[in-house]
Image (tube, rainbow, N blue to C red):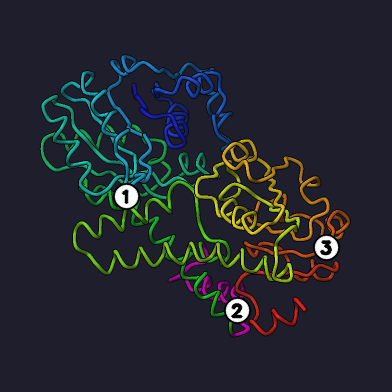
């Protein structure tokens, strides 16, 4: 099939490369000339494992190309819209300006039988409005939400756990489903479940899923506070909860909370949608989740201050991690950088290191010092704070690290390290949601 992917950011670049690997002829279109130049040479403008080989293969096979010219859309029989819908700068609602601009630019290239497929995360009702806007062209709209996880987006595209088609009933519904089945033929042949819904259900599926994941993370962080106050261990508690098949172990890791470009803005958009439709309990729940997540970061900063005898002024602190999660260079709403800023504002000399995200971070955070080399960041540190659980940090040898720092004190903001081995090597180790206030005071003294 001849397919266009409009918007070649994180979602669009991965989607375009994946569709080309299925054998389709794919053109990616974006107004960002630098981004298109990188992609046209087979280089990803962001770090995502496995993406560059997929890009290069598509380009070499002649199945994948990129352009800044909307006229390149003319030959496509199916258009995927993959532009970002960030949070508005003035409200908690999603900013749909890029999406609406794409729809307007796409209009001249629509004809009877063309299928337009939205993949962007949008407030419920957006698809219906777009369907109405393109009704006069004879084109049909469907909504096919994405469920990509940064760090495993290529695998999630090639082997998703489900496909959701939002297709309005009426003329063109059968053909729309048939075209999407052709697009995803290799995935469907592998037995991946496919759900066909109306537009509104498809729109809500993605944001509701992200809100539920945020709920699990916020819940275990709130429980972690109770664990600290009572001497319980939230990591052991989470392990016990995870063995219940009704609950599951994923997203039950207490620590610094969530960040990135999806969960924070999606729960706020979900809250705004609930408020708009008068669903007060859901609005209040999303507000509570957001507050618990923000509090998790403050608790890390407070713990750092306690481990530095109550004052951070002049203390050198090494922050391990800048990206909001491992296996990505995305620093949007990063808990690591939020905590680093809090510590710097209290007078600490903060040094941040990360395997991939330093180049993205240093221009945006001039008040922080960045090091690409881990040893340089650790040198002379009086406190080490793990904020992003990269495998490189999980595999650190406590004795080797101790030879670099001024004081062997570790705050594990992700509960990702083996506390016993670090303590055995002479480190003062502090996790999140472990122990009681009395035990903490005794440990610090």
Q: CA distance from mark 2 to mark 3?
A: 24 Å
Task: Look at discs 1 and 2 and give the one toward the viewer.
Answer: 1
Q: Nearer the viewer, residue 340 or 270?
A: 340
Tag 1, which secondary structure?
loop
Q: Which one is closest to the eye, mark 2 or mark 3? A: 3
Q: What are the residue bounds of the magenta stretch?
A: 230-250
Circle 3 residue: 407
Describe residue 171's horizontal placement relative to residue 203 as left or right.
left
Image point (37%, 56%), residue name: 267
For this rendering, which residue is in front, 51 or 388? 388
Give percent across and percent down for residue 314: 75, 57
Would you place residue 188 above or below residue 306 in this image? above
* Circle nearer the N terminus (2, 3): 2
x, y (%) of residue 436?
A: 64, 82
Check the image and name the residue furthest to the right: 403
In the image, residue 231 lies in the stretch drawn in magenta: yes
**Residue located beneath label 1 in the image:** 91
Give 146 or 345, whichever is nearer the viewer. 345
Q: Quadrant of the N terminus?
A: top left
Mark before the other along the chain sequence, 1 or 3: 1
Q: What mark, if any, has residue 147 been given in the picture?
A: none
Q: Secondary structure at mark 2?
A: helix
Percent position (x, y) of residue 401?
A: 83, 56
- Front-most of residues 220 and 357: 357
Which residue position holds label 2? Answer: 228
């Amino acid at each position: 099939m001849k397919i266009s992917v409009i918007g070649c950011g994180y979602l669009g670049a991965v989607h375009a490369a994946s569709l080309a690997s299925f054998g389709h002829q794919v053109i990616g279109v974006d107004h960002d000339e630098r981004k298109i130049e990188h992609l046209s040479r087979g280089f990803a403008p962001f770090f995502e494992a496995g993406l560059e080989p997929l890009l290069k293969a598509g380009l070499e096979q002649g199945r994948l190309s990129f352009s800044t010219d909307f006229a390149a859309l003319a030959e496509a029989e199916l258009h995927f819209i993959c532009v970002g819908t960030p949070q508005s700068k003035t409200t908690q609602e999603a900013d749909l300006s890029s999406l609406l601009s794409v729809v307007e630019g796409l209009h001249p290239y629509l004809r009877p039988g063309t299928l337009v497929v939205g993949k962007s995360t949008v407030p419920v009702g957006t698809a219906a409005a777009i369907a109405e806007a393109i009704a006069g062209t004879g084109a049909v709209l469907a909504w096919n939400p994405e469920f990509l996880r940064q760090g495993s987006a290529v695998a999630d595209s090639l082997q998703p756990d489900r496909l959701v088609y939002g297709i309005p009933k009426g003329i063109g519904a059968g053909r729309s489903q048939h075209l999407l089945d052709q697009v995803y033929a290799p995935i469907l042949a592998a037995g991946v479940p496919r759900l066909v819904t109306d537009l509104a259900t498809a729109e809500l599926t993605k944001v509701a899923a992200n809100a539920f994941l945020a709920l699990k993370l916020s819940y275990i962080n709130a429980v972690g506070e109770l664990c600290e106050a009572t001497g319980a261990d939230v990591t052991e508690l989470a392990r016990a909860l995870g063995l219940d098949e009704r609950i599951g172990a994923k997203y039950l890791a207490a620590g610094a909370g969530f960040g990135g470009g999806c969960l924070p803005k999606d729960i706020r958009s979900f809250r705004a949608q609930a408020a708009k439709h008068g669903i007060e309990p859901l609005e209040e729940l999303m507000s509570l989740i957001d507050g618990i997540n923000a509090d998790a970061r403050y608790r890390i900063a407070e713990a750092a201050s306690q481990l530095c005898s109550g004052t951070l002024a002049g203390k050198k602190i090494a922050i391990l991690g800048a990206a909001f999660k491992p296996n990505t260079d995305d620093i949007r709403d990063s808990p690591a950088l939020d905590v680093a800023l809090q510590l710097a504002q209290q007078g600490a000399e903060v040094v941040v290191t990360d395997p991939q995200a330093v180049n993205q971070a240093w221009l945006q955070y001039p008040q922080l010092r960045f090091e690409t080399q881990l040893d340089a960041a650790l040198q002379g540190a009086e406190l080490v704070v793990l904020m992003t659980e990269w495998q490189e940090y999980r595999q650190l040898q406590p004795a080797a690290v101790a030879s670099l720092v001024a004081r062997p004190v570790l705050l594990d903001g992700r509960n990702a390290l083996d506390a016993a081995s670090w303590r055995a090597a002479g480190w003062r180790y502090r996790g999140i949601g472990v122990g009681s206030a009395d035990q903490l005071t005794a440990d610090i003294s």
